[in-house]
Image: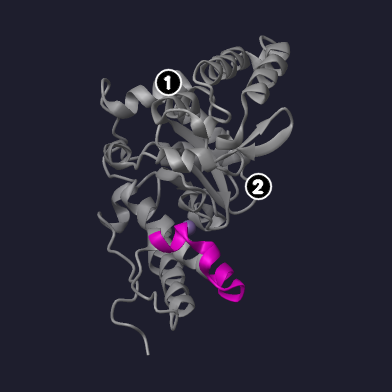
Amino acid sequence: MMCAMAYTVPELPYPYEALEPHISADTMRFHHDKHHQAYVDKANAALDGTGLEDADPRDVLSRLTEYPPDKRDAVTNNVGGHYNHTLFWESMTPGGATQPARDGKLAGAIRETFGSFAGCKETIKEAALSQFGSGWAWLVSDGYRVLIVTTSNQDCPISDDLEPLLGIDVWEHAYYLDYEHRRPDYIDAWLKVVNWDVVEQRYAAAPVPEVADILQRLVTVCSVERRFGEVTMDEARQHSTELKALAGWGPMAKVGAIARGWSDLAVNMQKRKAATVADLDPGIVEKAAIELWIVPPNRSMV
Ligand code: MN3
């Protein structure tokens, strides 16, 4: 028997034809009524009998490893499909794309990472084109900054500890009726209907990570992968030296600043007699995590 609280497809926040000529009523009808409905039906079937029939999709997606292996793929694909599509409908608006407020928090974060709003949109397009086969390109927050990542199938950034702010569906069902195989045309059209007001609200509500979680993040130091909290002063210093050797060369131009950050971290550890990063004050760990790009594990960071 299906639980009364089972997932349902939310109503579109605008009529099917509202996004024309960029996205047709036919595409919206198929995509929303058929595809999204199929994810919801399969998500309800996958969760049936687990005691989690009415769980918030966000909780489900952040705890995927807790599901039995035989159910995990169905849960990942279909709860992900339901959550991603719900976010997708809300991310579009009739009457043309809005813009983030010029002096707002989101616009500042976008300038910090991409240089400009135009640079951000260009990077979203590159990412959406780079995703091979079915999947999504996302603007996400790691709690400190905005980044762009891609995911395959219906994988959701929430499962990687990243907060999705905006996602473009690049499954062929999202554009084939209107643009056939021309994904670049679809991406350009979609960028014309993005509701950046909603993206701004999501960014304002994005969770800031706990320092304890930052200490658990994986980082490659001196070619060895370890927890950020376990990095020693000698490793921080040696890593800084190795990075300095690369700095300034073409695409590695940013590396100089990161090399200095590792060197500052080593100095801080020496001053405070900290054996590892975990022994430092939370404020210093947080600042270092931002400077050194200690971000959650992710797929295909752009
Ligand atoms: Mn879709």
Q: How many numbered discs, if any?
A: 2
Identify residue for label 1.
Answer: 112
**Residue 141 visible in image:** no
What is the x, y in percent for residue 82? 42, 63
Q: Tell me the amino acid under the disc marked 2.
A: Phe
**Vertically, is 13 above or below 43?**
above
Q: Is residue 64 magenta?
A: yes
- Which picture quadrant has residue 31? bottom left
Q: Residues within 10 Å of mark 2 (few under 14, many from 20)?
A: some
Judging from the image, the colouring scheme is one colour
Q: Main secondary structure of the magenta part?
A: helix
**Vertically, is 59 above or below 111?**
below
- Quarter the C terminus occupies: top right
**Vertically, is 174 above or below 140?**
below
The residue at the point 67 percent across, 33 percent down is 220
Instruction: Name the N-terminal-most of marks 1 and 2.
Output: 1
Q: Tell me the amino acid under the disc marked 1.
A: Glu
Residues shaded magenta: 59-74
Q: Tag 2, which secondary structure?
A: loop
Q: Which mark is residue 132?
A: 2
- Which picture quadrant has residue 43? bottom left
